[in-house]
Amino acid sequence: MGGSERTRELKRRRQRAKKLGILKRKAQKASSGDKAAIANKIRSLTPGADTIITNWKLEDS
């Protein structure tokens, strides 16, 4: 059997945080078309995507 549900949940959270860090670095150098692609990736990655996209100013909302 795998680890406990809490362990798996923490692993998923850490992986999401790592991935968001990579996307944030890419978003700072990205053109407008690339920013839209990054916003779509963030939407598929996490449920709190709208807040992140607004804070990072990836879209005009």
Image (cartoon, rainbow, N blue to C red):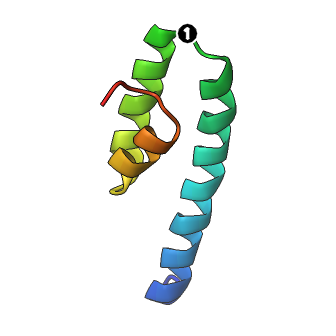
> Closest to the observer: 50 or 4?
50
- Name the residue at 43% across, 39% down: 53
> Closest to the observer: 3 or 29?
29
The x and y percentages for residue 22 are 66, 38
42 over 26 or under it: above or below: below
User: For residue 15, what is the image quadrant?
Assistant: bottom right
**Quadrant location of the C terminus in the rendered image:** top left
Q: Return the residue found at the far front.
A: 61
> Closest to the observer: 5 or 23?
23
User: For residue 14, what is the image quadrant?
Assistant: bottom right
The x and y percentages for residue 28 are 66, 25
User: For residue 30, what is the image quadrant?
Assistant: top right
> Closest to the observer: 31 or 57?
57
42 over 17 or under it: above or below: above
Amino acid at circle 1: Ser
- Number of marks drawn: 1
- Name the residue at 42% across, 21% down: 37
Classed neighbour count for the residue bearing mark 1: other residues with Cα under 10 Å, few (<14), some (14–19), many (≥20): few
48 over 55 or under it: above or below: below
Q: Which residue is mark 1?
A: 31
- Name the residue at 58% across, 70% down: 11
The x and y percentages for residue 13 are 54, 67
33 over 44 or under it: above or below: above
Q: Secondary structure at mark 1?
A: loop
